[in-house]
Amino acid sequence: MFIFDSKKFPDSPGIYLFYNDKRELIYVGKATSLKDRVASYFRNPLPTSPLKMGRRPIELLINEVSDVKIIQTESVLEAIILEANTIKKFQPKYNVDLKDDKSWNYIVMTKENYPQVKTVRQHEIENSKFDPRFNRGRNLKFKFGPYPGLKTREMMKLLQRLFFISHCKPCQPGKPCRPCLYYAMEQCLGVCTGEITSQEYKKKVIRPLVMFLRGNKKGVIRQLGKQMKEESKKENFEEAGRLRNQISALQRIQDIALLNKSFTSQQKFEIRNSKFEFSRIEGYDISNLGEAGKVGSMVVFENSESNKSQYRKFKIKNVLGQSDVGCLHEVLERRLKHSEWRMPNVILVDGGVPQVNRTVETIRVNKFKIPVVGIAKGPKRKKNEFILGSKEKEFVKWVNKNQELLVRVRDEAHRFAISYQRKLRKIKH
């Protein structure tokens, strides 16, 4: 039986492979922390009785393991993809025995001019009543998986952002074209507006996505890099910039939503057991209603509690127009000049990628090193989306364990900004 040694396993994402004494691969699993996940199998010794009657598959598995190998990945998303590809290739017996078809999904791509990318279950592919386009799988160009069902939706959201997957209807010649919501968010390349042909869509979206789902992220980045240089030579700098940002996103995949439940189900606001100190959080929001001018708020939470004596409000002085990002930049510039105020351990902003990127840049220019997290609303404004300005492992873990606290900070910053805005409006009238 295998004897676990924690020193041989890193605290990082990846997959683990269990082998029996015949050197046969019998099980593959994924982990956000290889050390913690593999250790969980071997903490409590199982009975070594040869009798298999009444024994659970997991008990049979553990007693059969004689060696464990690991493959580290740069993100949880890549671990999920690598696990699925490895299971599909080797068909380890315990993965087959333990798999529940109802909880596993596939990512499929249709053969249409603008291929649809969807998550489906196997029985839905085989049942043409579910979606006639599938035609029992005959109308599918690619099928990847299976993936754990609870994670597939989050995977699709992340893949959509990374690869600009379109979910809108293609623009029809002779008919008015309406841009979709994702087009306005710069996450759709223009399928809905007729700005991209089907061949361009396959080249820019489908091919890189297929390569990524096959586990070749390095190849994707290399291919995108070549395309970026080509666009720069053509002086198509907007497309070159998009490709540059896509490469950067792939190199720094932030997949908080895919982390194991052990990271997200804890309700405590954990600060201990970390080499980083996150006791002081400053939250920022901009209220930009136009009539009474633009204002910004700064709220302070120390040891998970608000400290209202240190709240600050800012009237925007130098930003023309309705730029929330510009207003946030001004607020941060003014705040960072107050060296007499205690500096935060974390800065939280109400907003998405543009706000986080501008905040990170402002902090860097002012020669500070403060991790940043932003909270944006999803497309239907029902679910919070966390955007990190740092990929430092301890910071990522801390954010996942303290999401409720961060939402409280965001809500308080929003409330404080709105109350200041209303106060100014009353004074004006």
Image (cartoon, rainbow, N blue to C red):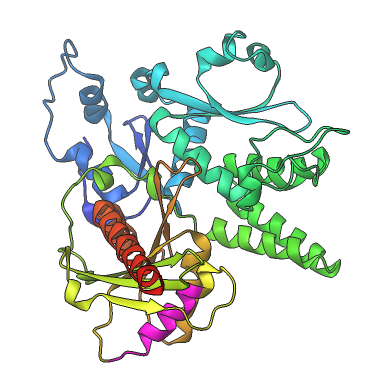
**Residue 226 in the figure: left or right of residue 219:** right
Name the residue located 38 percent from the left edge and 25 percent from the top edge.
95
**Count of numbered badges drawn on the protein:** 0
For the question of whether residue 64 can be seen, the reply is: yes
* Residue 348, picture quadrant: bottom left
Name the residue located 19 percent from the left edge and 71 percent from the top edge.
308
Residue at far right of view: 174
Stretch of the chain drawn in magenta:
327-339
Q: Position of residue 161 (x, y in %)?
A: 56, 48
**Residue 335 in the figure: left or right of residue 194:** left
Q: Position of residue 358 (x, y in %)?
A: 50, 72
Residue at far front of view: 429
Q: Nearer the viewer, residue 130 or 210?
A: 130
Q: Nearer the viewer, residue 283 or 118?
A: 283
Q: Quadrant of the N terminus?
A: top left
**Residue 188 in the figure: left or right of residue 84:** right
Name the residue located 31 percent from the left edge and 60 percent from the top edge.
415
Q: Is residue 332 magenta?
A: yes
Name the residue located 48 percent from the left edge and 63 percent from the top edge.
289
Magenta stretch prevailing secondary structure:
helix
Q: Nearer the viewer, residue 386 or 173?
A: 173
For the question of whether residue 83 can be seen, the reply is: no
Q: Is residue 217 magenta?
A: no
